[in-house]
Image: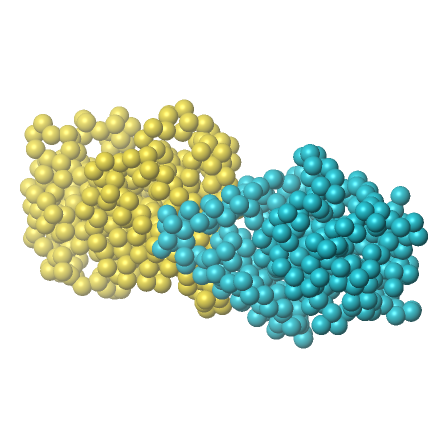
Chain colours: A cyan, B yellow
Amino acid sequence: MWTRSLVLSAPGKVILHGEHAVVHGKVALAAALNLRTFLRMTPRQDGRVSLQLPNLGSRRSWAAAELRPLLAAASAELPEAQTPSAQQLEELKELAGGKDGHEAVQSVAAATFLYLYLSVASKCGVMPTVDILVWSELPTGAGLGSSAAYSACLAGALLSGCGAISYPLQEGQEVARWTKEELDVINRLAFKGEQVIHGNPSGVDNAVSTWGGALQYVSGKISVLERVPTLRILLTNTKVPRSTKVLVAGVKAKLLKFPTIMEPMLTSIDAVSRECEGILEAMTGDPSQEHYSRLEDLVDINQHLLNGIGVGHALLDRVCQVTSSHGLHSKLTGAGGGGCAITLLRPGTTPSAVEDAVRDLTCCGFECWETVIGAPGISAHALPCLRAEVQKALQGS
Amino acid sequence: MWTRSLVLSAPGKVILHGEHAVVHGKVALAAALNLRTFLRMTPRQDGRVSLQLPNLGSRRSWAAAELRPLLAAASAELPEAQTPSAQQLEELKELAGGKDGHEAVQSVAAATFLYLYLSVASKCGVMPTVDILVWSELPTGAGLGSSAAYSACLAGALLSGCGAISYPLQEGQEVARWTKEELDVINRLAFKGEQVIHGNPSGVDNAVSTWGGALQYVSGKISVLERVPTLRILLTNTKVPRSTKVLVAGVKAKLLKFPTIMEPMLTSIDAVSRECEGILEAMTGDPSQEHYSRLEDLVDINQHLLNGIGVGHALLDRVCQVTSSHGLHSKLTGAGGGGCAITLLRPGTTPSAVEDAVRDLTCCGFECWETVIGAPGISAHALPCLRAEVQKALQGS
């Protein structure tokens, strides 16, 4: 073990429907976003463990001997271990270095790595000396599950590297995936990473990063959708900063203020999610224009409902207007109040039509990505088969 | 009788909340719009009956003797008479003249007058020779109840003139209103006029023109709200033409397509109307900023719901955006898909703030009126006490 290089990737996530309503017991649909986080793990011969995060401009390394005393603290009962303790996290953050505000993100990322590293090392009884480089196409802090993709990649690499699960890529294969049982192990460890980062995550993001496709989330229960088509989308970041906490509190206040008005709106959003789920399942076999038309209707309706419950923003409306002028349908995704919007693209939407829309959105100061949702979950890759840009990023410095 | 001049006016109407939802058994609130239709009736000595409609550029007159043969056909049982018969309407339209498209509106207006004139003449047994001039501040065909205001004015003038009801204005009074019982008689005759014009009217528009204030309409039942405050509004006409019939059919189709999504949205709109009714009643005694704030919330929420059920329009969104940039809250009123929007103004909104909003709306090509809703219903006026513009319009040519 730890003798070969591993390359793997995990997708981000978008909320397709049900954001905010899910807080009030309604159904949400989350889908894997094919903006991916890539990880390359290579053996080191110098007794050190290192972590490179080029997106954050961060590079850290630790002597394996320096980490050994922390092993005892790491739970030996992976992956059913308890929630990371506050004391454990404090120690890890100290070890991860950089306690000032500027380095907060880097520090949390390093602490997450150390927590997962020590958990796996403890389980397998070895302190592997490796270099891990993680590079992502996902913007951070945009509600696109970048932390879960990071956790899933770390979990997959460390578990595969130590032999707790297989590394599925065979000679000559471009890409491979793990078995359901192995994915379950990865998912549970990725959730631990999410706990280090977020404290009390829902588990949706790491499940999407692990399983891919789409999943239903309701009242704390996550169900992976069996068959999900891949849908082309345009993802637009308005770059308007917002606080999920404030937005969630705003909806709650409105629900208390106007219960008879707001409750049916949440019921309607719930029905949008369920209807969408039905359409996605129906279209897997034989997608028709009618399916896409209905998906577009749902996007439009839910965008209005989300505005109605008070989580819209003028610049999200702008995204909808601009894309509507190109015959495309958009809605906010995630917390709203700014952040990102998704725009459905039909299979037949021409590249020039997409370019025109992107040009107009870019003129508004927005950032756009053309990608797909319903993407595969965590995957093992042959490095030479990845896009040149990704290969280059994974070379490190 | 028929010896003195009468001057009276009746208001238009706006739907405050519940448009479209009312078609599906939900509550709608209609309010009297203080853009008014004025009527002046003066005796003639030449044996003729004349109708001047300066807004339509129309002036017609008939010899009373020429109308006498039609008296028999007019029902003698006012106001419980049957619906005007198709044959009767054909004869009246022929007498009203102008059967080509260009004069269609004038022809219907004249036929309505003749129908009401003959009904009252038949009831009272005289063929009064009068000149009637009707001038309106209301745009026609904008869903603002201009035909009902016209019918109510004609009904009030003819019934008062022939002595079927009193003419309430006393010497020295500026303005006066009829008793409840008399208003009921006026309303029923005005409804006949609406039947001539629209075929199968709901009765809401003539009730608002007659009673003023605001009323609740649900499942065909009209209830006048007891106490309603007068609210300042800005009325904006986007001038986008639309078909109420097509819009109503669109909502119905969407309800059939997505029943579980659409039905709760209609329920939510119903709750908006009921909540608004409660606020209006609560604020009559002592209106507070909190009342206005809640009314604004309802306007915003319903505008999003109306967009959600598919009766919005990009230029109605524009009205909302422009007024929102001035801190004001707007929604479409009536059929949607274009047409008019209402913007709430608080008592403290300064004239310059309103002027700024009007300037920006006018720049978009819209037409604006600053007025009030919850206005008085049909009223008798002393001509010299009316605004100079109205006095001038009522002088005729």
**Relative to residue A291, is residue B226 drawn left or right?**
left
**Relative to residue A200, is residue B235 drawn left or right?**
left
Residue A28 image point, x, y percent: 55, 61
The picture quadrant where one finds residue B330 is top left
**Relative to residue A30, is residue B129 drawn left or right?**
left
Residue B253 image point, x, y percent: 47, 65
The answer to whether residue A191 of the structure is visible from this angle is: yes
Q: Residue furthest top?
A: B352
Q: Residue at x 29, y 35 (%)?
A: B288
Q: Residue at x 49, y 68 (%)?
A: B257
Rendered position, B344 above or below B19: above
The answer to whether residue B246 of the structure is visible from this angle is: no
Q: Residue at x 26, y 25 (%)?
A: B388
Query: Quadrant of the image for the N terminus of chain B?
Result: top left
Front one among A310 and B22: A310
Residue B162 image point, x, y percent: 9, 46
Query: Quadrant of the image for the C terminus of chain B?
Result: top left
Residue A1 image point, x, y percent: 87, 64
Front one among A299 and B247: A299
**Relative to residue A393, is residue A195 drawn left or right?**
left
Front one among B85 and B327: B327
Q: Residue at x 49, y 61 (%)?
A: A26
